[in-house]
């Protein structure tokens, strides 16, 4: 069973701090040219909400109900009514067919290689004839932090020791948020691994939430 860490405090962190980026415009050009569109692994609506605001016909799907709840709240706060589905990409089964499917930061996330292949088949099934699938891909060597785990000596250090506290960020609610991650397992032949994220919230200096979630990653 594969897993993702986009729940609870991590979902809140995404909703709070990951609201912008060049991907909105980049992938948006494809959506403008081919609707209806599906934002697959839409998360908290970083791409979806601006596209809906621009009047584009886009649905969203994500495995995490927590991420979707933030997306819905943000969209509704702007008077938008998104169509959102809680499903895994490898089991995608939606009532609509699309001219464009966008997957931004979603392939190889919270899945294994077999599920990624199934997801590609499910995308094909959900595209109209001549439709477009557009996705980004994180190369295996993208994270220099993980380089040492490509060696047997490096992997002997796994699971990584908890990392020292990083920087806290202040949210719109005045609380302080912090994420720290560490590597639990890495397979250089399969080019996959499991990371763990610790998410904490402080309010008025007092720790009020402390959660730890793992995630499976495939580096294609
Ligand atoms: C890195 S976030 C990207 C969110 C959004 N696309 C964006 O760019 O802001 C990855 C998203 O993939 C979702 N996810 C992870 N595994 C999934 C799966 N197997 N099926 C569907 N969604 C998944 C997570 O819940 C999370 O919302």
Image (cartoon, grey):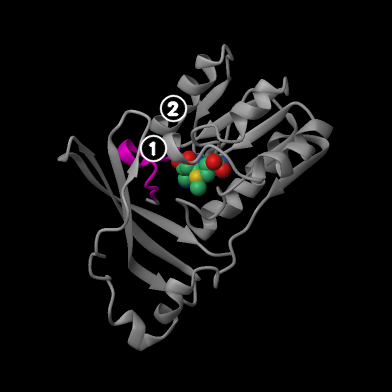
Q: Read off the magenta span.
A: 3-14
Q: Residue at x 33, y 51 (%)?
A: 179
Q: Which residue is mark 2?
A: 70
Q: Is mark 1 within 8 Å of ligand 1?
A: yes
Q: Residue 121 vs residue 154: left or right?
A: right
Residue placed most toward the observer, 50 or 218: 50
Query: Could you tell me if residue 89 is visible in this image?
Result: no
Mark 1: few/some/many CA within 10 Å (<14, 14-19, 20+): many
Residue 212 seen in the current view: yes
Query: Is residue 134 shown left or right of residue 77?
Result: right
Disc 2, SS = helix
Q: Residue at x 80, y 31 (%)?
A: 32
Residue 63, percent from left and from top: 46, 37
Residue at numbered disc 1: 11
Q: CA distance from mark 2 to mark 1?
A: 8 Å
Q: Quadrant of residue 29?
A: top right
Closer to us: 211 or 91 = 211
Q: Nearer the viewer, residue 25 or 69?
A: 25
Vertically, is 201 above or below 54? below
Please provide percent x and percent y for residue 10.
35, 42
> Of 71 and 173, which appears nearest the observer?
173
In the picture as drawn, the residue positioned furthest to the bottom comes out as 153
Is residue 208 found left or right of 127 in the rendered image? left
Q: Are marks 2 and 1 in contact (CB under 8 Å)?
A: yes
Q: Position of residue 149 (x, y in %)?
A: 40, 78
């Amino acid at each position: 069973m594969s897993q993702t860490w986009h729940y609870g405090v991590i979902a809140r962190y995404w909703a709070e701090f990951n609201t912008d980026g060049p991907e909105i415009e980049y992938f948006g050009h494809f959506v403008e040219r081919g609707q209806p569109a599906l934002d697959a692994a839409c998360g908290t609506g970083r791409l979806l909400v601006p596209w809906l605001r621009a009047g584009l016909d886009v649905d969203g799907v994500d495995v995490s109900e927590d991420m979707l709840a933030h997306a819905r709240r943000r969209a509704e706060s702007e008077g938008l009514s998104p169509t959102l589905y809680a499903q895994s990409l490898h089991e995608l089964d939606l009532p609509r067919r699309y001219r464009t499917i966008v997957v931004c930061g979603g392939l190889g996330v919270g899945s294994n290689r077999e599920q990624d292949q199934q997801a590609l088949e499910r995308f094909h099934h959900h595209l109209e004839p001549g439709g477009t699938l557009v996705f980004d891909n994180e190369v295996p060597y993208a994270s220099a932090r993980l380089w040492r785990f490509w060696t047997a000596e490096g992997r002997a250090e796994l699971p990584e020791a908890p990392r020292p506290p990083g920087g806290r960020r202040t949210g719109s609610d005045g609380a302080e948020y912090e994420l720290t991650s560490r590597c639990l397992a890495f397979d250089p032949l399969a080019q996959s691994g499991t990371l763990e994220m610790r998410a904490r919230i402080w309010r008025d200096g007092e720790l009020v939430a402390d959660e730890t979630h793992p995630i499976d990653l495939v580096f294609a």
